Image (cartoon, grey):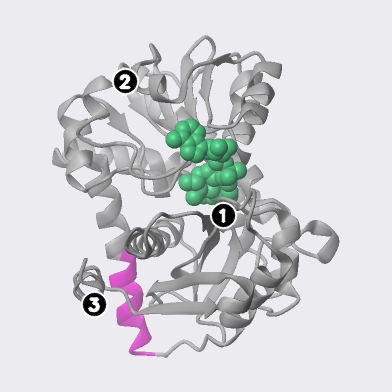
Amino acid sequence: MEILQHMQEYGHEQLVVCSEPSIGLKAFIAIHDTTLGPSCGGLRIWPHSTEQEAVWDVLRLSRAMTYKSAVAGLPLGGGKGLIIADSRKEKTEAMLRAFGQFIDSLGGRYITTEDVGMSPRDLEFIAEETNYVVGLPESMGGSGDTSVMTGLGVYLGIKAAAKATWSSDDLTDRTIAIQGFGNVGFNLATHLIEEGAKLIVTDLHEDALNRAREIGAEVVKSEDIYDAECDIFSPCALGSVLNTNTIPRLKCKVVAGGANNQLENESDGELLHKRGILYAPDYVINAGGIINAGSEIGGVYYPTRARELTERIYETTEDVIKTSRVEGIPTSTAANRLAERRIKAVQALKKIRPRDF
Ligand code: NAD
């Protein structure tokens, strides 16, 4: 991949390479677009096998954050952090603090929060080095675990997609296959179980699978999830899981989950559309976390406001599906258009009164 060529093609503003050999820190910060406000997005800790793969991941994730905040109506741009490490074995306090210092050096152009491989404690270490952190624990005056609101938003997005598919958003006895039973998968599952849905779950780790068994889910091997007999497939692990290999295997009518960047390529949105599978675009329905965490910016966090904004995900998902149906385009394209329209409108306003970060 030619990095600058990729950045210019997709409109990225900046890629920061962070290195501190004494503590084994190898990390990137990608800032995609700050038209709507400072870039914001979680820090992911993941053991990518090549730097190339890590750069591609962080650039793609930062772009998704721009679109996510735009569609959710937030005054935030898109950014993402990535530390190359195995969070279960290699993550250290020093690594997190060093990363916090790199964030601080950007003077507010990037605000971080939790993502895959992170715990609330990890975010506290970062917050000791920089103020540009959201999603802090409630005991520190923050909005708490982002995945609670993400789980709620994904659940509401699933309901909106169900309504468009079966003319009812009731999920009683619907079978939902969840890929990845971490923070988001679990929080989503609690809503689904409460409504009487049946769950099929997979994960790479036995502790996560045990948690799924405890709430009555059927557990399958990770590769078998694509063939599961289900109404809804809900990717809640990592990205690129919807591709030319997996889409033909799906037995569901709806794909709606919390993972970021589920489509391997834009053309996979078209493929789902052609197969008659309704795809609730990932960044439309998984925005609850950034809505919640972003509500901290400005100093005072109002939980009821964050919940109210998250509940709008149902309506936004319906709008995207409606546009897709009226214009005969994939839902992924309809969502992109919605985001791009908002960014363009705000760009025009900037000429009148430039925003300070
Ligand atoms: P997490 O680390 O708590 O959970 C991810 C889980 O997925 C882990 O249990 C992991 O073992 C499992 N997993 C990874 N690869 C897998 C595979 N191939 N098959 C089955 N399981 C696999 O992370 P999370 O916070 O739950 O985030 C999950 C996804 O949701 C990520 O894509 C993340 O970017 C996205 N997301 C999270 C939030 C949030 O608030 N945490 C918000 C928006 C989007």
* Position of residue 308 measured from the top left corner of the image (x, y, whole percent): 61, 49
Q: The disc labelled 3 sits on which kind of residue?
A: Leu
* Position of residue 140 measured from the top left corner of the image (x, y, whole percent): 82, 65
Residue linked to disc 3: 4
**Residue at the image position 69 percent from the left and 74 percent from the top:** 97
74 on left or right of 31: right
Vertical position of residue 357 compared to residue 317: above or below: below
Q: The disc labelled 1 sits on which kind of residue?
A: Asp
Specify the farthest residue to the front: 22
Check if residue 351 falls in the magenta segment.
yes
**Residue at the image position 39 percent from the left and 41 percent from the top:** 317
Q: Which residues are magenta?
A: 342-352
Disc 1 is placed on an element classified as loop
Indicate which label's residue lies in the foreground, 3 or 2: 3
Residue linked to disc 2: 253
* Position of residue 260 measured from the top left corner of the image (x, y, whole percent): 42, 48
**Residue at the image position 72 percent from the left and 73 percent from the top:** 127
Residue linked to disc 1: 115
Check if residue 337 falls in the magenta segment.
no
Q: Is mark 1 within 8 Å of ligand 1?
A: yes
Disc 2 is placed on an element classified as loop
